[in-house]
Image (spheres, grey):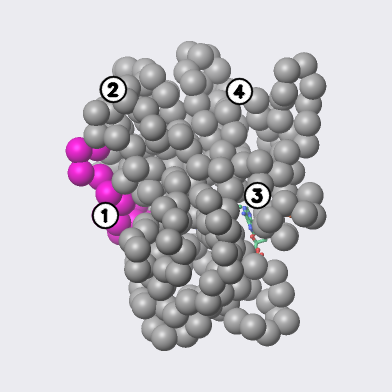
């Protein structure tokens, strides 16, 4: 797959809920991205902000790419103010994807926080012969109501955990919700903050020895494997190696990850 640098115009930049936006822009890359692959976006040609920012591909057609992003700092705040027609630059498609070429399995897709941006393409790509269930974790009730509607959940049973007190969904975090499940899947694919992934691994996956793959979200600088700014410790045989999330990941086998949290 070719990595290309593309200039692209914004088609839509829609506010979905407090602090979350869905940005659609022209797709200039003929390749089909895999689930958990990402693009590195620069929002203008100025020196500031200098660094590109990584975002998982939320949805994709030959003409259009979309990302679901949360406003957390400088660049995402500037992004939220961009209008239709503004030009951005993106580099991609980057990183290794989840392997969705599996059949007739019970599969759980799990996403929390900004990890929700990465799970939609997984739901699109996973073969229909699998029995897929989706587990989502949100901080706020309104986020859960507004964001869950944007995921491709046809033929998928959804379970939602919300930290905020509410009467519609499970109240608590994603790991607490998963621990209440009566069944066990054949495989797990998860995207989210390290704290969530670590909790999921130690409290559930390791306990029941379920094959699992995690997409990591480490802060990145170059995004293309040259600066070593995004490394994670990964077990390889009886050695521990520093692997780059941007180039060797973002997807790693859960049991190989040495969590820092
Ligand atoms: C592979 C990958 C895929 C991603 N996909 C998405 C996505 O689909 N949607 C989405 O909203 N975000 C996603 N992110 C995170 C996104 O890249 C950051 O939110 C963004 O870079 C923040 O830029 P900023 O300038 O607004 O914030 P900054 O000003 O750079 O940071 C603001 C604060 O947030 C913290 N921060 C920045 N990046 C991260 C991070 N990755 N994890 C935890 N804390 C962070 C900083 O330490 C700082 O405290 C992804 C990250 C990676 C590595
Ligand atoms: S961000 Fe530079 S090596 Fe990953």
Residue shown at the point (58%, 28%) measured from the top left? 254
Disc 2 within 8 angstroms of ligand 1 (CB): no
Q: Of the two numbered discs 2 and 3 on the same chain, state the one appearing first in sequence.
A: 2
Name the mark nearer the viewer: 4 or 3.
3
Q: Position of residue 6 (x, y in %)?
A: 54, 72
Lower position in the chain sequence, tag 3 or tag 1: 1
Q: Which residue is mark 3?
A: 246
Residue labelled with disc 4:
255
- Mark 1 highlights which residue? 149
Question: In the rendered structure, does residue 239 fall within the stretch colored magenta?
Answer: no
Is label 1 in a helix, a strand or a loop? loop
Mark pair 3, 1: CA separation? 29 Å
Tell me: 231 left or right of 208: right
Q: CA distance from mark 2 to mark 4?
A: 23 Å
Nearer to the camera, 63 or 236: 63
Residue pictured at 39% horizontal, 83% vertical: 84
Is 171 above or below relative to 143?
Answer: above
| Image location (x, y in percent) of residue 218 | 65, 49
Other-residue count near label 4 (Cα within 10 Å), few / some / many at <14 / 14–19 / ≥20: some
Give the quadrant of residue 232: top right
Inter-mark Cα distance, 2 to 3: 30 Å
In the picture as drawn, the residue positioned furthest to the top comes out as 208
């Amino acid at each position: 797959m070719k990595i290309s640098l593309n200039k692209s115009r914004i088609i839509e930049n829609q506010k979905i809920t407090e602090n979350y936006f869905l940005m659609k822009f022209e797709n200039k890359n003929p390749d089909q991205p895999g689930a958990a692959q990402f693009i590195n976006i620069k929002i203008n040609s100025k020196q500031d902000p200098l660094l590109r920012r990584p975002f998982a591909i939320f949805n994709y057609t030959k003409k259009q790419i979309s990302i679901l992003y949360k406003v957390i700092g400088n660049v995402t705040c500037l992004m939220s103010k961009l209008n239709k027609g503004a030009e951005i630059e993106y580099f991609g498609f980057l990183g290794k994807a989840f392997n969705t070429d599996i059949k007739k399995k019970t599969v759980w897709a799990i996403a929390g926080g900004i990890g929700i941006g990465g799970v939609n393409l997984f739901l699109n790509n996973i073969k229909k012969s699998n029995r897929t269930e989706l587990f989502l974790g949100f901080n706020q009730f309104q986020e859960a109501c507004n964001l869950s509607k944007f995921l491709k959940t046809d033929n998928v049973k959804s379970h939602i955990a919300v930290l905020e007190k509410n009467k519609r969904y499970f109240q608590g975090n994603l790991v607490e919700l998963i621990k209440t499940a009566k069944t066990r899947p054949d495989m797990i694919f998860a995207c989210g903050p390290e704290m969530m992934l670590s909790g999921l691994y130690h409290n559930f996956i390791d306990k029941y020895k379920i094959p699992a793959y995690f997409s990591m979200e480490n802060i990145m600088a170059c995004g293309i494997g040259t600066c070593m700014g995004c490394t994670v410790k990964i077990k390889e045989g009886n050695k521990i190696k520093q692997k780059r999330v941007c180039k060797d990941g973002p997807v790693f086998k859960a049991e190989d990850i040495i969590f820092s949290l």
